């Protein structure tokens, strides 16, 4: 017997269907209403069912963009995105963006048609060992071993994607879309759980003791807090302890900036206010963050990560506990469940803790010093405009409901200093995989997830060259996102390395690009080139309220550069062959 429900067809027992039907109905049961990719013959039978199932297929211009779109969509909605492509090149084109989602802990299902079972191993047309390629950049590669297992394997893919917070490859030989099977479509609650709990009770009591006795407790709030909707609980803990709250690297929305205990982000081009307040912490509560090596490196020559603090680390993934820093107390659990229980026990164990007025005043002063510093830096003249000034104006104009995506590179990374958010799921950054071309497709995916929110992407002209083709997608699908292209005419993050370490010898650094506004207009979008703060403010405000995709080509000074991006990984050049002796730093 089968009945139609809002989440598809509910089957009380197994019934006859095709594998394609089983896959699509499993997607419907998961609440999937759209997916990203480029059509291909490998999955044409499934593709044919999507409109009738109520699943929109969004055709991108390059498959790398598909997974970035799904990544952006998932980060703002919490629902796993789905991508698909032709076997071979269609799927391998997603390697970079799936790897980025893997390091970003973004649940995602990659439907990966592969060579048909009769031809596997013959090096046929568009054949690739996709499972091997994706093994190290996904949480799991789930292979369909038999036509009768298609729905079961897809359920497994979703279960692991949500449980382990990352992409999963669902690999299905292309001939297994066809045939006849007996299958029962299950609802998600029948094969996966959503509540994780607060971990070990005794460990929680230990954490309470550490925090209760702390003189200078501090908190780092990470992506896990956003995903678990735990910000209010972290606020309660912070207010009880009078503890400053920093956000982990490029997760500036993990604690509201308008809260008096917020001190800003840590990591490269983060906030000095966060770093100075963390330096002398005696107990550090890290919630929903893996405390990545890169995200906790010294910045601005401040070695800020506290050396003697007792660290309490909360994470849903046991692999992240104490992975990078020695801890005093590790709590394996959901960020919300842990924070909620931790606050309950803390307020019971230490009900009369006085407000630390002096510490709160110190936090306020550090915040203001930092705001003043970066505003003054932004007001320095540039030719034609200081890139910091562009970022300052953009940050001043975004509203609380605006979602901002940021790419990788000199100016995109500097945005870490300026972007402030009062609501969660508003800041989507390229994070530690560090690939260019993330921000714009992620913005398109975010807009699909939150169509009523303004969405802005920030990318340099180098990164923009890797994603501008998706303007056609935004135009075709009527997705009005705003692209802010910070155009400094070079790969400036690397150019800064050549300035500081290679005596201004520029190899491959300069970019001669087209007029990006004109290109955007030729693709059907709105486009404008600006080179001064007043025009930028006007054009950005208009774009933010427009119902058309808009590209702002923002001309800035290419000589005003941020500190070296990988200062930890570079050394002054030494040469031994006579041919290169003049390039030795000792001979400059």
Image: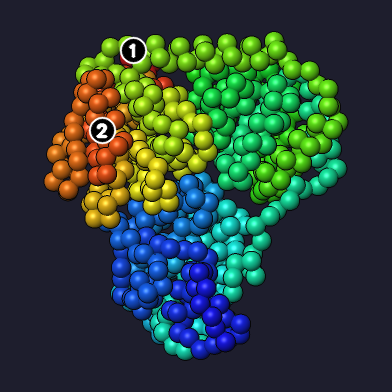
Left or right of 114: which side holds 303?
right
Q: Residue at x 60, y 67 (%)?
A: 188
The C terminus: image quadrant: top left
Q: Is residue 103 above or below residue 344?
A: below
Q: Is residue 363 above or below residue 175?
A: above
* Residue 579 seen from this side: no
Q: Quadrant of residue 66?
A: bottom left
Provide residue 309's location: percent of width, then percent of height.
73, 25
Left or right of 184: which side holds 28?
left
* Residue 562 seen from this side: yes
The N terminus: image quadrant: bottom right
Provide residue 299's location: percent of width, then percent of height.
52, 22
Q: Is residue 257 above or below residue 19?
A: above
Task: Name the secondary structure under disc 1.
Answer: loop
Residue closer to the observer: 364 or 219: 364
Q: Quadrant of residue 565?
A: top left
Provide residue 35's location: percent of width, then percent of height.
40, 62
Work out whether mark 2 precedes mark 1 in sequence or the reverse, and give the earlier one.
1
What residue is disc 1 on?
A: 379
Residue closer to the observer: 120 or 327: 327
Q: Nearer the viewer, mark 2 or mark 1?
A: 2
Q: Residue at x 82, y 41 (%)?
A: 203
What residue is disc 2 on?
A: 542
Q: Quadrant of residue 173?
A: bottom left
Q: Residue at x 31, y 28 (%)?
A: 492
Q: Residue at x 38, y 72 (%)?
A: 50
Task: Name the secondary structure under disc 2.
Answer: helix
Its colouring scheme is rainbow
Per the model, the C-alpha gap separating discs 2 and 1 is: 23 Å
Left or right of 213: which side holds 269?
left
Residue closer to the observer: 431 or 539: 539
């Amino acid at each position: 017997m089968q009945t139609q429900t809002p989440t598809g067809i509910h089957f009380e027992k197994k019934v006859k269907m095709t594998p394609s039907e089983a896959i699509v109905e499993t997607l419907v049961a998961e609440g999937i209403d759209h997916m990203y990719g480029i059509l291909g013959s490998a999955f044409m039978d499934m593709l044919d069912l999507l409109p009738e199932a109520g699943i929109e297929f969004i055709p991108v211009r390059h498959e790398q963009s598909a997974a970035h779109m799904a990544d952006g969509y998932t980060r703002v909605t919490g629902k796993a995105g789905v991508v698909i492509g032709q076997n071979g090149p269609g799927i391998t084109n997603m390697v970079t963006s799936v790897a980025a989602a893997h390091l970003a802990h973004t649940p995602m299902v990659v439907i990966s048609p592969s060579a048909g079972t009769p031809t596997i191993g013959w090096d046929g047309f568009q054949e690739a060992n996709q499972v091997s390629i994706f093994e190290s950049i996904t949480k799991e590669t789930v292979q369909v071993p038999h036509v009768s297992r298609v729905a079961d394997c897809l359920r497994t893919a979703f279960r692991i994607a949500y449980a382990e917070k990352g992409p999963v490859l669902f690999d299905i030989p292309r001939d297994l879309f066809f045939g006849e099977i007996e299958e029962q479509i299950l609802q998600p609650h029948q094969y996966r759980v959503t509540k994780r709990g607060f971990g070990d009770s005794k460990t929680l009591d230990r954490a309470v003791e550490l925090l209760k006795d702390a003189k200078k407790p501090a908190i780092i709030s990470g992506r896990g807090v956003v995903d678990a909707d735990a910000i209010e609980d972290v606020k309660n803990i912070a207010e009880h302890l009078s503890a400053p709250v920093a956000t982990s690297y490029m997760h500036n929305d993990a604690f509201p900036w308008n809260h008096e205990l917020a001190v800003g982000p840590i990591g490269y081009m983060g906030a000095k206010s966060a770093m100075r307040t963390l330096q002398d912490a005696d107990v550090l509560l890290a919630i929903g963050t893996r405390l990545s090596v890169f995200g906790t490196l010294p910045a601005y020559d401040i070695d800020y990560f506290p050396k003697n603090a007792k660290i309490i680390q909360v994470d849903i993934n046991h692999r992240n506990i104490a992975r990078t820093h020695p801890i005093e107390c590790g709590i394996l659990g959901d960020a919300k469940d842990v924070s909620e229980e931790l606050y309950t026990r803390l307020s019971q164990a230490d009900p009369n803790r006085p407000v630390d007025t002096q510490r709160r005043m110190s936090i306020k002063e550090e915040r203001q010093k930092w705001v003043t510093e970066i505003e003054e830096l932004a007001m320095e003249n540039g030719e034609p405009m200081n890139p910091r000034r562009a970022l300052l104006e953009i940050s001043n104009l975004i509203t609380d409901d605006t979602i901002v995506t940021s790419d990788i590179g000199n100016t995109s990374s500097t945005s870490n200093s300026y972007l402030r958010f009062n609501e969660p799921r508003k800041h989507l950054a390229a994070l530690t995989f560090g690939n260019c071309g993330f921000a714009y497709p992620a913005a398109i995916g975010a807009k699909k997830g939150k169509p009523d929110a303004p969405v802005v992407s920030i990318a340099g002209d180098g990164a923009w060259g890797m994603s501008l083709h998706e303007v056609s997608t935004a135009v075709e699908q009527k997705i009005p996102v705003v692209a802010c292209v910070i155009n400094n005419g070079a790969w400036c993050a690397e150019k800064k390395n050549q300035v500081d370490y290679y005596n201004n010898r520029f190899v491959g650094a300069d970019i001669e690009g087209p007029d990006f506004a004109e290109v955007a207009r030729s693709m059907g979008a709105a486009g404008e080139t600006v080179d001064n703060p007043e025009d930028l403010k006007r054009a950005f405000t208009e774009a933010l309220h427009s119902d058309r995709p808009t590209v702002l080509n923002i001309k800035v000074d290419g000589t005003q550069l941020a500190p070296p991006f990988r200062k930890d990984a570079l050394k002054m050049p030494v040469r031994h062959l006579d041919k290169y002796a003049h390039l030795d730093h000792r001979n400059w």
